[in-house]
Amino acid sequence: MAQEIAFAAPRAEEMTKSVTGLAGAGITGVVEGVIVKMAPQLGALEVPFTWAALLGVPAVGVAGALFSRGMIGDLMQGVAAGGTAVAAFTLPAMLMPDFFGRRPQGQLGAGQGVKQLMSGPLGAPQRAQARAAVTAEI
């Protein structure tokens, strides 16, 4: 059976569905983008926080879109679309850092005039003091 193609002005229901989905996708994209950009400041929680946001938001959106009806279903469909878009944009850079990012400079070995500072929270005061000394020299 042949289908006809027709162009007509959208009805109110179609406009509402489109705007609701776009709002869900836009808000999700902004919020999840901020979460992914903020994650490096969390230290040891960076990796689980980033992965939870990148995989959890689209999963919640898909579940909400499948199990709800009406405007909430349309909104959750937008959340799923926005979350998936952010994940698709971010995951390649996370999975292949050699292609997308700079390599960190090599660390200096312990030798004359090089002091190794402790890592972790116990070494934080020493590191802060060393940073302050370097800033004072400049």
Image (cartoon, rainbow, N blue to C red):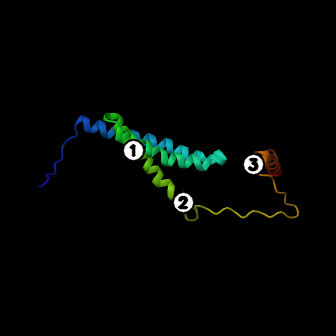
**Label 3 amino acid?**
Gly
Q: Nearer the viewer, mark 1 or mark 2?
A: 1
Q: Which mark sits nearer the N-terminus, 1 or 2?
A: 1
Disc 1 target residue: 62
Rendering coords of residue 52 (x, y %): 53, 46
Residue 71: in sight, yes or no?
yes
Tag 1 and tag 2, C-beta contact below 8 Å: no
Instruction: Give the distance between the C-alpha atoms of the residues marked 3 and 1, in whole angstroms.
Output: 39 Å
Q: Residues within 10 Å of mark 2 (few under 14, many from 20)?
A: few
- At 66% from the left and 47% from the top, the residue drawn is 43
Dot placed on the residue nearer the N-terminal end, 3 or 1 = 1
Task: Name the element at disc 1.
Answer: helix
Q: Is residue 99 left or right of residue 115?
A: left
Q: CA distance from mark 1 to mark 2?
A: 24 Å
Corner quadrant of residue 8: top left
Residue 99 % position (x, y)? 55, 65
Q: Position of residue 79 (x, y in %)?
A: 41, 42
Secondary element under disc 2, as helix, strand or loop, is helix
Q: Quadrant of the N terminus?
A: bottom left
The residue depicted at 53 percent of the width and 58 percent of the height is 93
The amino acid marked with disc number 2 is Leu
The circle drawn on residue 120 is: 3
Q: Which mark is residue 89?
A: none
Q: Residue at x 43, y 50 (%)?
A: 85
Q: Give the quadrant of residue 42.
A: top right
Tag shown at residue 95: 2
